[in-house]
Image: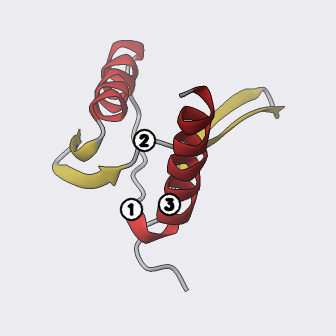
Amino acid sequence: MKDFKFEQKASLSRLEAADRLAALADALREGGEAELELGSGTLNLRIPEDLRSEIEVEVEDGEIELEIEFKWPTASAHRAPARAARSRSTKRAAAKTS
């Protein structure tokens, strides 16, 4: 079962599509708590430093479908062990060079 799902389908001009992608790019660049204006509503997301991505292109029945997907854990606790391990290895490397 999904915790939450937001889906919106709309016909857009090329410029409107570019504006939505630019807003998403700005939110990704800024990170942290981001607000995305999506049509009549606003979507608030916590965006961490590290993301997983997938790009998929399908050509079928005379149409091109382009999907860009980003994934990240819902809780920062999922990332804590990796960050702690990086911190320890950085400290070890610094100690070796001293």
Kindly report the distance in space between the C-alpha atoms of the residues bearing marks 1 and 3.
Answer: 24 Å
> Is 68 positioned to the left or the right of 42 in the image?
right
Can residue 5 be seen by looking at this rendering?
A: no
> Which is nearer the eye, 62 or 59?
59
Residue 35 is left or right of residue 62, and the answer is left
In the displayed structure, 83 sits above or below 18; it is below
Contact (Cβ within 8 Å) of mark 1 with mark 2: no
- Dot 2 lies on which element? loop
- Where does the image place residue 16, in percent across and percent down from the top left? 32, 21
Residue occupying the point 22% across, 54% down: 44
Q: Position of residue 66 (x, y in %)?
A: 65, 31
Residue type at mark 1 is Phe
Q: Specify whether 41 is left or right of 22.
A: left
Q: Nearer the viewer, mark 1 or mark 2?
A: 2
Label 2 to label 3: alpha-carbon separation: 10 Å
* Residue 45 location, quadrant: bottom left
**Which residue in the protein does label 2 denote?**
49
Looking at the picture, does residue 43 appear above or below residue 66?
below
The residue nearer to you, when weighing 69 against 92, is 92
The picture places residue 1, in percent across and down from the top left corner, at 55, 86
At label 1, counting other C-alpha atoms closer than 10 Å, the crowd grade (few under 14, some 14-19, many 20 or more) is few
Q: Which mark is residue 6?
A: 1
Q: Residue furthest bottom?
A: 1
| Residue 84 is at least partly visible in this image | yes
Q: Nearer the viewer, residue 75 or 88?
A: 88
Please count the marks in the image: 3
Give the residue type that dot 2 points to: Glu
Residue at mark 3: 79
- Residue type beneath disc 3: Arg
Residue depicted at 29% across the width and 26% down the height: 26
**Residue at left 30%, top 39%?**
31
